Every structure is written in structure tokens, then in C-alpha cells.
Image (tube, helix red, strand yellow):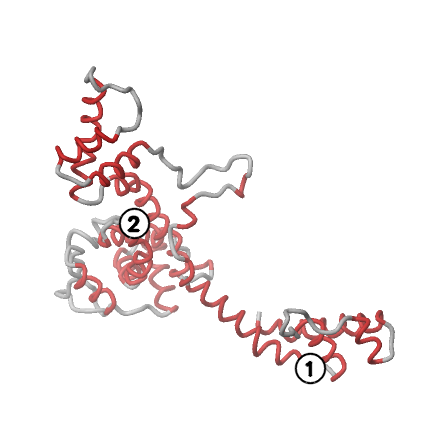
Amino acid sequence: MSLTKDHIETSAGAVALSSPWASASTLLPPLGNLDAYISAVNRLPMLTLAQEQEFARKLRDENDLESASKLVLSHLRLVVSVSRKYLGYGLPHSDLIQEGNIGLMKAVKRFDPDQNVRLVSYALHWIKAEIHEYILKNWRMVKMATTKAQRKLFFNLRSMKQGFKDDADVATHRDTLSADQIDSMAKTLNVKREEVIEMEQRMSGGDVLLDPSPGDDGDDAFGPIAYLSDASHEPTALIESYQRDMMATDGISAALQELDPRSRRIVEERWLKVNDDGSGGMTLHDLAAEYAVSAERIRQIEVAAMKKMKKVLAVYA
């Protein structure tokens, strides 16, 4: 199968929506009209699990490009959503969407409906991978020159620095500019001296490897690419946060209800009670004295209560 932008064009042209989604005359606006494109994408119907499985099998078994088109079109809104997380890098939103769409098409091409995984989960990896690669390729350019004044500095700073070095009267052969050279350059280019200093610092700084290869740390090798997106609003992160909240409230409450009064008080005193001064509740010896048993007996009751609570909390995990 050869699934390319020739079959499903999502940037430079318009995409005809196949029946039963819409009439053949209904078109997705080009990405040049971003607001119209996003509005149209959000109106596209979502696929049910049965439809997704049907289209994916037709694509895999029969090389049905119409099925591929429907799979891609139904997930274009996912690309728009993911791409918004990368707007802080100074790159056009339309370009980020375009790169994400390429990742989506790669995901559709490789998707196996028999793996019991929804396409949305599988496609997230491919969409993010393409956007990450695009950012990495353009990161240095973006950091170098993002405004008209900075671009002017970028193209003139290097030659002007060389001119200063070639001038025998003021040559210093240093890597940094002197205060007089900065003032002269700012006046010549009609920019602020602070802008000259900033661009000089950018150009003299070394490249940072955003995605380092594993070294001595192996799998623990870590780079700035890990911070590219904001994971706090990822669907999985939201679900995990919701589950933690449920466990900390409803789950703990339900688990405590399964205990007898003595066991419940021991758990509350040992693990759940916090005094105004930040200290905890009663110690094993304090509870042993109150119930006229040994501290070891209190510990045994505590362990048994924890096991019983763990079974109840498993429902909220």
C-alpha cells in the first residue's frame, strides 16, 4: 500500500469527503485558511469502534484507499489538538498541523485492527514523533531570528564582526564584541544595542542536543525534548489524576468502612491523622497502652487492616 499526500491532501489543497460523510462537493479548506480548516475538521464525524475496525481491515486486506481516507479524516481533530501544545516554539500552527497529519497518515498505514487498540491511542505516537522532528529541525533557526530586526542582525552580524577583526586599528581578536563595537553596529543597523548583544549571545552559544543518544546512563539518558509538550492535559494524565483523587477520597472512605472500630482507629491514628504542628497521630506504644495489649499486637492488627483495605482500593486503581 502506498498512502501518501497524493491520496489524502490536507495542506496545499482541499479534501473531498466521501459518502456517507458528506456530499462529494464538500471540501476541507486548505490550511492557509486555518480558522476555516479547524472549524471544518471539528465538524467531521467520529468513527465508532465497529466502523474503525471495518475500515482498518479493508485498508489492510484490500488496500482500500477510501477506507484510509475515512480513518484519516475522522482523526484530523486529534492532530489539531496535539499541535496546539507546541505553539510556544514560534513555528506556524499550520505547519505543525501539516507535520502532525503526516504522522497520522503513517499511523493509519501501519495500524493493525487486530491488536485490540483504538487508532487514537496508536496515532498519538506517530503524530507527536513527526511534530518533534519538525521542531528539532527548525529549533536553531527559530531561536536565531524570529523578528525582522533579529533577521537583519543575523545576516549582518557575522560579516560586521569579521570587518572589526580585519581593521588593524581596533582588532582585538576576541570572540566577543567590545562596547564601542556594539554601539557602532547598533547605529549602522538602526537597532538597539541590547538587540545586538542578544543576537551575539545566540550566535556564540553552542547547539544543544535536544534528543541525546543513550550514553553511560543507557535508558536513563535524558534531554530537553522531554519538555517539548505539556503533559498535564494528556488524556492519560487526566485519567490518572482522576483515579488518584477517587482513591484518596471515595476509595479510602470505602476501605475504612470495611474495618472494625478498633482497626479503623489504629489506621487513622497511624496514617491519616495530622496535627496542627505537622506531627502525626499516636505511636504503636501509645495505642498499645490504650488497648492494654503489646505494641506487636497493634502492629499485627494494623497489617491485617491494611491488607483488607488494599482489596477494597483495588477497585479504584
Give how far apart the Cα atoms at labels 2 and 1 are.
Answer: 52 Å
For mark 2, what is the residue? 89
What is the quadrant of the C terminus in the image?
A: bottom right
| Residue found at the far top of this picture | 168
* Numbered circle sitting on residue 41: none
Check disc 2 and give the amino acid type.
Tyr
User: Which comes before the other along the chain, label 2 or label 1?
Assistant: 2
CA neighbours of label 2 inside 10 A, class few (<14), some (14 to 19), many (20+): some
Q: Nearer the viewer, residue 130 or 299?
A: 299
The percent coordinates of residue 162 (x first, y second) are 21, 22
Secondary structure under the numbered disc 1 in the rendered image: loop
Callout 1: 10 Å neighbours few (<14), some, many (20+)?
A: some
Where does residue 285 sit, x and y in percent of width and height?
82, 71
Question: Is residue 23 rendered to the left or right of residue 93?
Answer: left
Q: Is residue 46 above or below residue 62?
A: below
Q: Mark 2: which secondary structure? A: helix
Is residue 133 toward the left or the right of residue 316 in the image? Answer: left
Q: Residue at x 28, y 42 (%)?
A: 143
Is residue 298 positioned above or below 92 on the image? below
Tell which of 142 and 44 is nearer to you.
142
Q: Residue at x 74, y 74 (%)?
A: 282
Where residue 117 appears, x then y in whole percent? 45, 61
From what the image shows, is residue 177 above or below residue 290? above
Which amino acid lies under the numbered mark 1 shown in the image of this protein? Glu
- Check whether the beta carbons of the residues at disc 2 and disc 1 lie within 8 A of each other: no
* Left or right of 109, for residue 285: right
Mark 1 — residue? Answer: 258
Q: Is residue 146 above or below residue 31?
A: above
Q: Residue at x 22, y 36 (%)?
A: 196
